Image: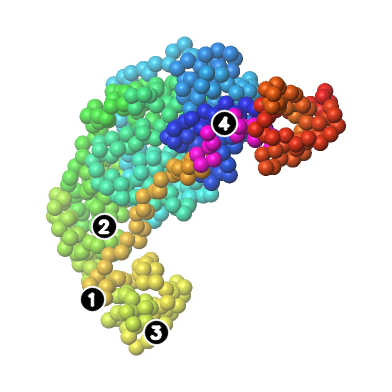
Amino acid sequence: MSTHARPLAVWLAAASDAQLAALFAARGVRADVAWTDFFDAAEALLDPASIERVLPRLTLAEATALRRAVDGGDAGTETDALVALALLRPDGTPAPPVAETVGDRTVPAPPTADAQPAATEQQAARAAERAFTSVAAIADIVLLAADSPLTLLANGALGAGERRRISETGTAPEIIDDLAAIATDAGLLQATDRRLRVTDVGTAWLRLSASARWTALAEAFRDALPRGIRTDAGGWLPTPRWPRQHPWDPNWAQRSAALTARAELLGLITHNGAEPEWAVPLRQGAPADATALTRMLPAEVDRIFLQNDLTAIAPGTLEPALDVRLRSIADRESAAQASSYRFTADSIAHALTTGETASSILDFLGEISLTGIPQPLEYLVMQTSQRHGLVRVFTDPGSGRTRVTSTDGTLLDAMGVDQSLRPLALARDADGLTSRVGRDSVFWTLTDARYPAMIVGPDGAPLVVDRNPAPPPAPETATDHRALIARLRAQQGPDADAAWLDRELEAAVRARAVLLVEIAMPDGSIRELQLEASGMGGGRLRGRDRSADVERTLPVKSIRSARVIDPSTA
């Protein structure tokens, strides 16, 4: 048992619950850790493995101060922060286990120059274009995830198939992971069950203007930055300083490079590290101001050309809300300042499945079309609408099984022998088809097989079912240490010296150690004994007196101090 743990145990016992909770959270202490009292906590926190785990979290300033304290200097303004992490004692000195663990670790020397240069007009224009492209690419990723959740590998990265899907939208493969990370930090996407799903925040974000989309992403990016590169004002340090801010984290160089790349994708820095005008408020901790950025973005349009070949052409960057709805009705064929869209029977059927009607589709297209609605497109919408719902899917209230009905008996017969529907185990009866599979699963399987299916409720009215509902908000990840702190408090006695002595004696008994014990005699004198500890109980210590070679039993309350000695020198 380390004697270095005692001063820390005393400090822990005197700390407030808030201080203890912050310390345990920073040191990664589990809520169910098997600590009995504050001495256990102190010993665990001074364990070299525990210290090794916290050192990578230290900022450059904290690492420099700790290095200075280990070398015998003053930690300065970082003393309180390091004491709060149990890396320094309240007097600013490190416990020996901390000094040994820090060892020969070094901190980088301050640079000769690390200011953030201002971007030129040409550099800013390129940064704005990059930001606009990135925001549009993130919108594509969010829309793809809304249509079908993106599969994640065990390490949290997107799978090869998903990367291929995203790259088909025109996004460069090498930036897909960074774009997905930006979207996740902004809360647009959420990883659940190794799937990346769109959240309610992401759904609302899709309908924002381009500048509002960028503002939300840029502020979320800043809020998610590690504390080592954040400033007290809530902004961030100049990006040339980022690579040095966590000097004892072996993964920081890679992480810092990724964060710098994401800042460039959002147009917060240029390729050569210069800073555009619109990045300054964010760096200083103020709300984002996209005014200067918006001036360099292409103007948005709110009208399209509908053509006889079932295509639509946007003569500029279409307003995001219009683009999102149009893409729910048509397939986008090309993405540029003049995007093109194609209407098909499948795309119209998909819109009907998600709640659109023939009237709502035609009304929407009529409002945004500069050329009216061509007859072939109107005919396609009406024909698809008439066919949609020919197959009705519902739950039989009597049996609880899923029923599939249609006025077209030939269509029912075709579904009954369709090999792609075998997993549904559809059974034919006089009224249609039945299945033990759930209603929603039957509906989506039929839809994927291109049958004109519709879910209806008990009253026969059509229902709209979200195939990929937004996941619930992510639960709080912070560990609750209140029960642990209460347990440690319950074992906190009024006499810390007596409690520490009991632990020393118990440890000596377990180790069969030789102790040099100071005994307070009845006459007030002090006597020293060399005792080979053998047992403890009932408030008494038992052991063999090595000098007299006799067994002694000593009242613990009479022991003034005890320390382990090397038996070879006794």
- In this rendering, the label closer to the viewer, 2 or 4: 4
Name the kind of residue labelled 1 in the image.
Answer: Asp
Q: Can residue 99 be seen from the camera position used here?
A: yes
The residue that mark 2 highlights is 329
Q: Disc 4 or 3, which lies upstream in sequence? A: 3
| Secondary element at tag 1 | loop
| Secondary element at tag 3 | strand
Q: Disc 2 or 4, which lies upstream in sequence? A: 2
Report if the CB atoms under discs 3 and 2 are less than 8 Å apart. no
Residue 231 placement: quadrant: top left
Classify the position of the N terminus by image quarter. top right
Decide which of 91, 495 is in the foreground and name it: 495
In screen coordinates, is 196 left or right of 339? right
Name the kind of residue labelled 2 in the image.
Answer: Ile
Q: Is residue 504 a member of the stretch shown in magenta?
A: yes
Residue 137 placement: quadrant: top left
In screen coordinates, is 323 left or right of 446? left
Name the kind of residue labelled 4 in the image.
Answer: Ala
Decide which of 264, 197 is in the foreground and name it: 197
- Residue reaching furthest to the bottom: 430
Q: Where is 15 relative to 432, above or below?
A: above
Question: Alpha-carbon neighbours of circle 4 within 10 Å: few (<14), some, or many (≥20)?
Answer: some
Dot label at residue 459:
1
From mark 2 to mark 4, how far is it between C-alphas? 73 Å
